[in-house]
Image: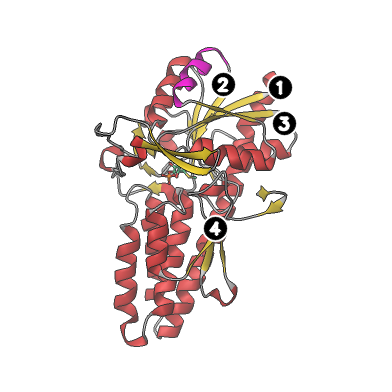
Amino acid sequence: MNIGGTPYRTLWELPGADAIEVIDQRVLPHRFTTTVLRTADEVAAAIRDMTVRGAPLIGAAGGYGVYLAARAAADECIDTTITQAAKMLAAARPTAVNLGWAIGFVCHRVQTATSPDDKRKAALAAARQIVADELDRSRRIGEHGLFLIREVAARKGAVNVLTHCNAGWLACIDYGTATAPVYAAHAEGIPIHVWVDETRPRNQGAALTAYELGEHGVPHTVIADNAGGHLMQRGLVDLVIVGADRVAANGDTANKIGTYLKALAAHDTGVPFYVALPSSTIDHTLPDGCGIPIEERSPDEVRWIDGLGTHGPERILLVPAQSPARNPAFDVTPARLITGFITEDGIFPASDLKQNKNKING
Ligand code: MRU
């Protein structure tokens, strides 16, 4: 996707695969900077502090974290170094299953190699494969989701999509998940407009989704999180499309806090509610959403807000200094509220997600 007219991805290798470089998402939208991650520790810290964020991207970064651990390990302790690094990386954020999945994928590939050098090569090849596969999955999610947008456009011309958080290309390698169909529709010339939930407390919608849509020239409007239900009641939303951090086998979906309320409003107003996800986000070990671990982040993310003041970046205290806050970072939307899942293989109702059958889009 484009930034200032230049195509970017969210993560890339430095020459010689000595390190990876990523876009620092903590300082967007007011500053575009990148940062180099040279070790597994640095990758874990970047995932924890949300320099990199979004389920597919933290998976890809985690995969490279295992490789960087293997790269730095002494031959005689390469296996234990990799195991320890994998454990540390997997603990960096608990909700998005992509992280553990990607780390497991790289570790499994390493186990099939015998010599230390072959293990390093296997880890690098596996990390590269995750990036290539996520890229392809996002592109295909866009192609399938386009079907839904074309359908609305054929009926009523302009299409209004509402999205929550950032399930855009910044959360993936490119294209995004929830935004991939939007970009595909925009490329096809369909008049499309996106309602962007600000997504308190970290404001991924206001800071990141608005930024990437704007850089790519897609019409959009930022709204307060509380405005979505009202817009749906007034007929101003044709489709809700959100991303996912972990989808249980029955379709219960963990995504950014606030997603559940949007699903309830969509259900009440008859607006179709879709979840866009790559298969790397499905947790087949969980029968339903009850077992999905929900990350609790620092209360200070609720109490303080970051922005651009007249003299540069500023942090403002929003609440009385003594007031405590609580910050669950995700919620679980029950499958019964979800119209369908836009995956790389097609669009499925929750009942058929696991088997990939009864595609909605042919
Ligand atoms: O806490 P974040 O910013 O990592 O949460 C991101 C989300 O909840 C996204 O909607 C989700 O990861 C889908 S990303 C394609």
Tell me, yes or no, if residue 285 can be seen here.
Answer: yes
Q: CA distance from mark 2 to mark 4?
A: 32 Å
Q: Which residues are magenta?
A: 225-235
Which of label 3 and label 4 is nearer to you? 3
Q: Earlier in the sequence, mark 2 or mark 3?
A: 3
Give percent across and percent down for residue 261.
39, 25
Q: Residue at x 57, y 71 (%)?
A: 14
Tell me, yes or no, if residue 250 can be seen here.
Answer: no
Q: Main secondary structure of the magenta part?
A: helix
| Disc 3 residue type (three-letter) | Ile
Q: Nearer the viewer, residue 151 or 292?
A: 292
Label placed on residue 237:
2
Label placed on residue 133:
4
Which of label 2 and label 4 is nearer to you? 2
- 2 and 3 marks in contact (CB < 8 Å): no
Identify whether 260 is placed above or below 59.
above
Give percent across and percent down for residue 252.
36, 36
Q: Residue at x 53, y 59 (%)?
A: 22
Q: Earlier in the sequence, mark 3 or mark 4?
A: 4
View extreme (right): residue: 189
Q: Which residue is mark 3?
A: 190
Identify whether 245 is placed above or below 271.
below
Q: Nearer the viewer, residue 289 or 207?
A: 207
Q: Residues within 10 Å of mark 3 (few under 14, many from 20)?
A: some
Label placed on residue 157:
1
| Disc 2 residue type (three-letter) | Val
